[in-house]
Amino acid sequence: MNWEVIVNPTDPLAQLKDIHLPEAISWWPLAFGWWVIGATCIFIIVIATRLILKHFFAQRYRRQALTQLKTLTNSAQHQRLMDLLSLLKQVASSAYPLQNFASLSHNEFIIFLQKSSPKMVFEALPEDWEQLLYAENTTVSSDLVDQLVVQSRYWIKSHFRAEKLEYNC
């Protein structure tokens, strides 16, 4: 058998016609479902931003108190103890604006701090600690004041919110 190549004088590919594609689908206008998804995402972002900002501004008094607590290290021990108690009363007044801390004695205030903390704080205070505040010739141990500063820092960072507080002054 003799195979002969038949050569067509005209190119068969030249006879093909281009495929005409449909026009590209436009992004706009979007389908209704995409508008719903977009609006939902924007709503979630706005709500999350508001909650984050509300939490940030609600915790500002804690950040300011922790900054003030760092400045207490430069004074004498007796003065540090007085300033520490004053700072704790300021923080408590900011955290619990409906409570009246000015009328509380120092012992009642310490009991309040203990009840508003998730763990026991200020248990290292000596029995006569109020005399340390007002007596002129008493020496305050720097270890005691340092321990109270650490416990104050813990209380400032972790005290209960006003809604969770069970103790009323």
Image (cartoon, rainbow, N blue to C red):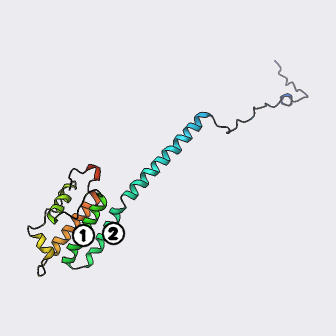
Residue at image position (22%, 75%) is: 80
Quarter of the C terminus within the rendering: bottom left
User: What residue type is disc 1 on?
Assistant: Ser
Q: Residue at left 25%, top 61%?
A: 154
The nearer-to-camera label among 2 and 1 is 1
Which sits in the foreground, 143 or 126? 126
* 169 lies left or right of 94: left
Label 2 SS: helix
Residue furthest bottom in the image = 137
Please rate how many residues cluster around mark 1, counting C-alpha atoms within 10 Å: few if below 14, some from 14 to 19, many from 20. Answer: few
Q: Amino acid at mark 2?
A: Thr
Q: Residues within 10 Å of mark 2 (few under 14, many from 20)?
A: few
Q: Is residue 153 above or below residue 55?
A: below
In terms of image quadrants, where is residue 53?
bottom left
Q: Is residue 11 left or right of residue 58?
A: right
Out of 103 and 166, give the one closest to the viewer. 103
Q: Helix or strand or loop: what does disc 1 sit on?
A: helix
Identify whether 138 is placed above or below 119.
below
Please tell me whether residue 2 is drawn above or below residue 67 in the rendered image.
Answer: above
Q: Residue furthest right?
A: 9
> What residue did someone put label 2 on?
67
Distance from disc 2 to disc 1, alpha carbons, whole Å, reads 14 Å
* Residue occupying the point 21% across, 77% down: 79
> Where's residue 78, x and y in %?
18, 77
Identify the residue under disc 1.
86
* Residue 141 drawn at (x, y percent): 14, 75
User: Residue 84 sits in which quadrant?
Assistant: bottom left
